[in-house]
Image: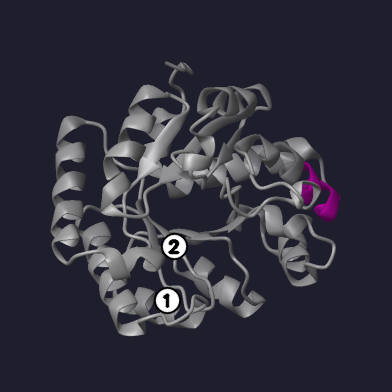
Amino acid sequence: MALIDTHCHLDAAEFDADRESVIQEALNKGIKMMVVPAVHRSNFETVTQLAHSHSCCTHALGIHPMYVASAHLDDLVYLRETIAKQIESGNPPVAVGEIGLDFFIADYDQALQEHYLIEQLKIAKHYDLPVILHVRRAIDDILKLLRRYKVRGGIAHAFNGSRQQADAFIALGFKLGFGGTLTYPRALKIRELVSTLPLSAIVLETDAPDIPPEWLKNDRRNTPHQLLNISQLIASLRQINHAQVTEITTNNALEILPNLAKLFTRPQVIH
């Protein structure tokens, strides 16, 4: 059973010089699939084409909370129309994402962020798609909205909340994404979660090129193939066989992202 990176931004400019070799290195390390979420209308086409040209990649479409200030309300109409067209063409996104709230950034507009999140939750519900959520410093607010605007579940990306909050996401049908942050010895809360949560609730991610693991802390760029070492660390923290972590977290990703499951057995081709 191969690994799945449920969240990486392979379309980022940091990969322009060597994107193909980065993808090949991930395949060499056993990362069979990589989910590439959009963050703004301007990269909907880019992530879609990346997924279409690389059978090991798939995409999600959404407007990230850090980009709502530069978005326009008609971008929500465009998002809905684009998802509809892709579903009709037989190449649907695996989720609506990356969407959510971010109350960490300076001078954030909570009302604007919430408007975009609510409207995108409605789109996800309309098309019965899961969501990939950005939840930084905003978990309780997001949980309130999820209880009001019920979607089929999804992934709480880069989860960094309490056990109570984790259980609340799980009860709503979500998986929790963990990656490079847990590799830092001082990340005691995250390590405790990764060690004690049901393994059935966990999916793996890198958020490349961001959130580099501890062994890349002095580098500027994270890469998807780091997922192998991250998964091995989880196995060590839980004191279980690495093959078990691989199999269960991969099955978790396929369960929570049904459109990804449909693609999982495709031959891997890099164009």
Disc count in the image? 2
Q: Residue at x 52, y 45 (%)?
A: 8
Is residue 235 found inside the magenta-colored segment of the image? yes
Q: Residue 203: x and y, percent?
A: 59, 50
Residue 96 on the magenta span: no
Q: Amino acid at mark 1?
A: Ile
Quadrant of the image containing the C terminus: top left
Local packing at callout 2 (Cα closer than 10 Å; few below 14, some 14-19, many 20+) is: many
The answer to whether residue 40 is above or below residue 104 is above
Pointer 2 residue: 133
Answer with the quarter of the image where residue 99 lies. bottom left
Question: Which residues are the magenta region?
Answer: 232-239
Q: Residues within 10 Å of mark 1 (few under 14, many from 20)?
A: many
In the displayed structure, does residue 141 sit left or right of residue 74?
Answer: right
In-front residue for pair 241/20: 20
Occupied quadrant, residue 197: bottom right
Q: Would you place residue 66 above or below residue 266 in this image?
A: below
Residue 18 location (% of width, % of height): 55, 27
Please say if 234 is above or below 270. Answer: below
Q: Which amino acid type is marked by label 2?
A: Leu
- Secondary structure found at label 1: helix
Tag 2 near tag 1, CB within 8 Å: yes
Sequence order check, earlier mark of 2 and 1: 2
Report whether 187 appears left or right of 207. right
- At a point 62% along the width and 39% down the height, the residue shown is 223
Residue 170 point in image, percent of width and height:
53, 66
| Quadrant (top left/top right/bottom left/bottom right) for the N terminus | top right
- Residue 142's tag is 1
